Amino acid sequence: MTRRRPAASGAADSAGGAAEAAAERGQAEANPLDGRSFLLELRHKGAVAQALSRFVWLLAVPFFSVWTLLGSSWLWSVRAETPQCMPTETHFWFAAFWLGLSYIWISIYAALGTVAATLEWRVRRAEGDLRQIEDADVISRWGQVSRLSGYQELPTSQGQGLTPADIRKLGEATLLLDEEAKISGELECSICLTSFEAGDKVRRLPNCSHTFHKSCIDLWLLRSADCPLCKRGVVCGSNADRSR
Ligand SMILES: [Zn+2]
Ligand SMILES: [Zn+2]
């Protein structure tokens, strides 16, 4: 099979994200403790990185938060009930200063944790969408695309594409031998740059009639609601149409 030729067109950049992702995955594996994303990423590759991430979120942050609250209540009760036990006023303010720093640390980690959880939720939603369009054809052409290594593989245009249900409504066809020449002069799919062959499952976009492999255009449409060739909106009322 000559299907997996390297993609060169702009359209392939997006739909071929799976191949790029594999390369990025390789880089991430090479440097699992990359400081920029370590705390925001909940899907680490290496066992050490995964263990460290769990230690931070499941043990260190909860323990430190409880410990800080406990310390605050102790300091408060000493101040209110037994001030004679505090040697000098400076001791009180010293403890209060460190508690203040601890609350700042906890706030920063709470914010990072919220962002990390939101990103993980978006990754799972994207994987769910990909699973719905991932059939044997998609797997043979692009590999298993529904398993993302982390939030860095999320499309930058998330939310601009069609839902899997919308994509299914577009209708598909299987090419017959004598139909190959009829695809309005298109001899190859502009996403994977592979010639159409009899038996290929294809989709013809309703507004512009451009034709692509079903497995190629479906991945594109999840990210973008316009035709990769002419940029016309795929369905009436799609994001691409609305933006005009
Ligand atoms: Zn294709
Ligand atoms: Zn088009």
Image: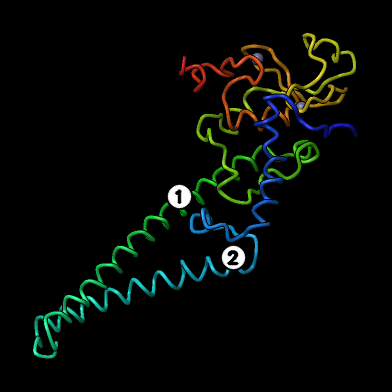
**Where does the image place residue 229, in percent across and percent down from the top left?**
66, 17
Q: Nearer the viewer, residue 201 or 43?
A: 43
Give the quadrant of ligand 2: top right
Q: Residue at x 63, y 14 (%)?
A: 230
Q: How many marks?
A: 2
Q: Is residue 239 above or below residue 25?
A: above
Residue 41: % across, % down: 53, 55
The residue drawn where x is 89% and y is 13% is 178
The residue that disc 1 covers is 118
The tag earlier along the polypeptide, 1 or 2, is 2
Which quadrant would the N terminus be assigned to in this image?
top right
Label of residue 49 in the image: 2
Q: Check the image and report above or below for 72 versus 216.
A: below
Q: Are marks 1 and 2 in contact (CB under 8 Å)?
A: no
Q: Residues within 10 Å of mark 2 (few under 14, many from 20)?
A: some
The kind of residue tagged 1 is: Thr
Q: Residues within 10 Å of mark 1 (few under 14, many from 20)?
A: some
Residue in front for this viewpoint, 154 or 105: 105
Q: How are the colours assigned in the image?
A: rainbow
Of 76 and 237, the residue lying toward us? 76
Residue drawn at 73 percent across, 26 percent down: 191
Which of label 1 and label 2 is nearer to you?
Answer: 2
SS category of the residue bearing label 2: helix
- Amino acid under disc 2: Ala
Left/right of residue 131 with respect to residue 107 in the rendered view: right
- How much space separates mark 1 and mark 2, taking CA atoms? 20 Å
Q: Indicate the position of residue 102 as horizontal and vertical percent values.
A: 30, 69
Q: Is residue 55 above or below residue 182?
A: below
Q: Report the residue at 83% width, 32% height from top.
A: 5
Q: Position of residue 31 (x, y in %)?
A: 63, 57
